[in-house]
Image: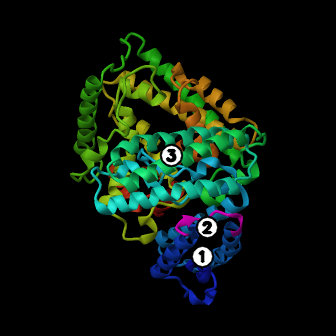
Amino acid sequence: MRLSAPLWLALTLLPLSSLAAPATPQDVATLFSQWRDFQRPPRVDGIPDYSAKAMAAQARALPRWLARVDALDVSGAPLPLQNDVKLVRAEMKGLDFDHRVLSPWTRDPAFYVTVFDEQSDQPARETEWADAAVELWALKFPLSPEAEHDLLAGLRVVPPLLAQAKKNLTGKGKDLWRMALRIIGEQKAALIALAPKVASNAELSAAVKAAMAATEDYGRWVEQQAATKTGPSGVGRANYDWYLANVALIPYTHAQLVTLMERELGRAKGTLALEELKNRALPPQLPATTVEEHQRRLDEVVKIWTRFLRENDFITWEGWMGPALAILPGGFNPKPPLEFFSEVEARDPLPLRLHMWHFMDLAMLAHHPPADPVRTRPALYNIFATRTEGFATALEELMMHAGLYEGRPRSRELVYVMLGQRAARALGDLHMHDNTWTLEQASEFASRETPRGWLRLDGRTVRGEQQIFLRRPSYGTTYIVGKAMTDELIGRMSRNGPLPMKALLDGLNRTGLLPMSLVVEELSPRP
């Protein structure tokens, strides 16, 4: 039975005059809450509806929402409120981009995968997925009655949603179709692993089997369809530039990002060569070969990293921060051949402890949620990535220059190995979307140009990353462009003396997970 007209459609009929001027924080919060309800697809019998009819209705209503946010007068408001409005507008432009260009519900078969058994280290899962996620990693067995109910409801969405996908998907992008099979396979594997855990519950067991059968059938269908697809999967340079300016809030063009990534790739390789020259008489940095040896190294570097922050008074310390800094997502498997980040982790866990500042960000949201409702929920469309990925990348080199790597000269090399990998793969993002490279060409380039041959072309990481970047334009660039904006902020904050590191780290915690361009605005000293 089809539901009546959803709340979001009725809300679009509100007159613009209903919003007072100048806008108050409550005005912004109210619009934001209503907007988030609108942004979600309507439901039919509990199933998200991405049909052509439903998406056309949403697209027709969207201009009214853009007009409402544009009617908010925050010209004389404090900067944080002005930036809240920018963020809400950027989310609306993100949905506009989805309808005009990206259209994941018609172009990307992986969009309809909804069962996940691994936690993302980001505030929201990378790229875009149908609004029906089943987060298996968050379950604690044995399940409570409430958890059983929620899991059952989530699993029952899988078969009808995948059936709907076969009707909705009309895109021609070869790489999006071909690479979707990997992610569909991951859903199948997650369901296989779940089955014995719920075997004693007849309803759950049946739901898992039905979801698995639907996933297998969907995989076969996608494989058949993929063989007929020959079109490009990128969004094109003009659309990419529009996305950067209006959604990601990245103050660079596609052409400027190409130059920046090429420059950082060259800098990383050149600096690595000099570090290796300086260290040529030192013994090689041998990887840990057992879980126990890696754990010993990890425990040591967590103590070093924690002590470094506290003894230098670089952050207002709280007890929950230590455990957050120690999180190792996915564990460590020493069995060769190693994937790229395992090659780094095996030699010294310290560089990736810095990048896993991600879990400090997530813990900060849990322990000190912003009072500002716009900043309490993660921004849509991964708009936060220049802050989360960009600052985490900046932190690796920033803390090295601040003295953290004293006595670990070979680990300085690892910083530049990782920087080179981020730059090489970002060029794949840029050239897949200007449709000059296929995903395979982007993967080959990233593998070839990453120092030391650690980004293996026969590994999982290289193509998996390029798939993320193809599905979310600009994500691959956020690591380095966010680092560049962090450098700009550091320059502003240290203009009249040494860098006030505590003001920087505390300020980042205080502002929340905004795009880095807005963070720079808020934390820059006023003239």
Q: Quick one: label 1 or label 3, which is nearer the N terminus?
A: 1
Task: Tell me the SS state at disc 1.
Answer: helix
Report the span colored magenta: 45-53
- In the picture of the structure, the residue carrying the numbered disc 2 is 92
| In this view, the mark in front (3 or 2) | 3
Please determine whether, in this image, residue 204 is positioned above or below residue 432: below
Identify the residue position indicated by label 3 in the image. Answer: 212
Q: Residue at x 70, y 56 (%)?
A: 167
Picture disc at residue 69? 1
Exactly how many numbered labels are in the figure?
A: 3
Amino acid type at mark 3 = Met
Q: Are marks 1 and 2 in contact (CB under 8 Å)?
A: yes
What residue appears at the point 66 percent right and 59 percent down from the top-left corner? 98
**297, above or below 28, in the image:** above
Of badges 1 and 2, nearer the viewer stands 2
Closer-to-camera residue (313/244): 244
* In-front residue for pair 337/153: 153
Vertical comparison of 318 with 87: above or below: above
